[in-house]
Amino acid sequence: MPRLTARLGAAAALAAALALVTAAPAPADPPTPAGTDLVGMGAPATDALFNALATDYNASLAAAGDTASPRLYSWDARGTGTITPKAGASSVLRPTNTRQALTTLNSNTGATVDFVRLSRGPRVTDPTSVDFVPLVKDAVTWAAPAGGNAPTSLTSFELRSIYACDITNWRQIDSRWPDATIKPVVPGQFYSDSSQRRSSFTSDEMTALASSAVSNGDPGAFYAGPCVTSGVADDQGEDALLHDPNAIVPYSVGRWVGQVTGGHRKPGDDPGELVLKNLDGIAPTSEGMISPNFLASPYGRVLYLGVRDGDWTSSDAHGQALRRVFGRQGWFCTSGEAKADIRSHGFLPLPVFVCGSSTHA
C-alpha cells in the first residue's frame, strides 16, 4: 500500500508543520483594549483564528518598536452575555452569529466596535453602510460521533429528509444500516413554519448547510421538523446531546481541521468525538486540510470581515489603521505570519487579488 502510506505520511508531516506554528492559546476575551484599538467580535467560526491573528499582529508591532499604532483585539462568540469591548465603550450584548454581529456593528460607532466576523457574504437585506471584506476559504458539512451509527456519507437529499423528519431511522436509507432512530441536532435555535415547511436558523453553520443543501440556495427552504433538537453551540462536540451515537450536527470544516490537525482545542471549543462526514460522496478533508473538491462544491464558502463603509474608506487615522491590518496591502494579506495562522486554524488563504477587497449589499 505505498500510495496510502505516502498520503498518511504527508498528512502527518502537515500536522507536525501546523503544530510548529501553533502559538500558546490566546485568551477567550482580551484585557480592556484602549479606546483607539481595533476591536472586533461576531460569528464563532473564526474565534480562535482571530485570537491568534491579534496576538501575532500585536507582537509584530512590539518587535518593530511601534508603541503608538492601535493594537488588534477580538472577542469570542461564547462567554458572558454583555461585554464592554474597549475603554469608554458602550456595553453591548455579545454577538453569537452573523446576524447579531451586523446589528451590533450597525448600531454602534468605532468607539465601541471596529469590525465584526461574518460567516457569509452580503445579502440584499443587509445594511448598505456595511462593507464585506473577504477573509478566508472554508466549507461546512455534517458531523457525527466516531464509532456511532451514522454512515460515512449522506446525499443532500438524505440530509434534508433527515432534518425534515421524513427519514427518522438509518434503515430507511439502507436496510444494512443499524435499526436506530436518527437524532438531528441544530446549533442555536430554529423557527419552523410546518404549513410552509420552511425554517430559519440562528446558527451560521446550520444556515450555511441549509442554503447549500437546497438547489435554489434559500436556507428557508430547508425544513427542520419536530424530531430536531436545538440549543448546542456551533463547532463543538462537548455537549451531551452530541454524544449520542445517532446524533448528527452541522460543522465548519475549517474549524474542525484547526481543532484536530492544528491542535487548537480548549474547553468549549473541542470537537470531542465528532468526526466530519462526506456529502454527496465528496470528502470534506484531504491530507489534513479542506478538500479542494469539497471547497469547489456548493458547501464551500468564504468567511468575511464586516466594517462600516465610512470607516473603511476614510482617510483619517482610524480608516488607515483598519486598512493597515486588513486592506489589500495590509498585514493580514501580506504577512507570512497571518498566512501561517490561517492554515494552522484550518482555513485557506484567498488569492491576493481578492484579499482586502470589499463589497456591500
Image (cartoon, rainbow, N blue to C red):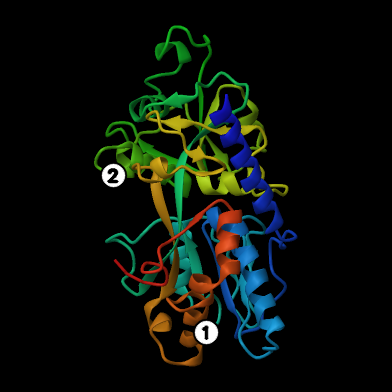
- From the top left corner, tell me how far across and down residue 249 is, in percent: 52, 34
In which quadrant will I find the N terminus?
top right
Residue bearing the label numbered 2: 217
- From the top left corner, tell me how far across and down residue 261 is, in percent: 63, 45
Residue bearing the label numbered 1: 321
- From the top left corner, tell me how far across and down residue 109 is, in percent: 49, 80
Q: Name the residue located 40 percent from the left edge and 15 percent from the top edge.
A: 173
Secondary structure under the numbered disc 1 in the rendered image: helix
Choose between 207 and 50: the one closer to the eye: 50
Q: Amino acid at mark 2?
A: Gly
Q: Amino acid at mark 1?
A: Ala
* Left or right of 103 in this view: 44: right
Secondary structure under the numbered disc 2 in the rendered image: loop
- From the top left corner, tell me how far across and down residue 81 is, in percent: 63, 59
In which quadrant will I find the C terminus?
bottom left
Choose between 235 and 90: the one closer to the eye: 235
The quadrant where residue 257 appears:
top right
Q: Name the residue located 33 percent from the left edge and 61 percent from the top edge.
A: 122
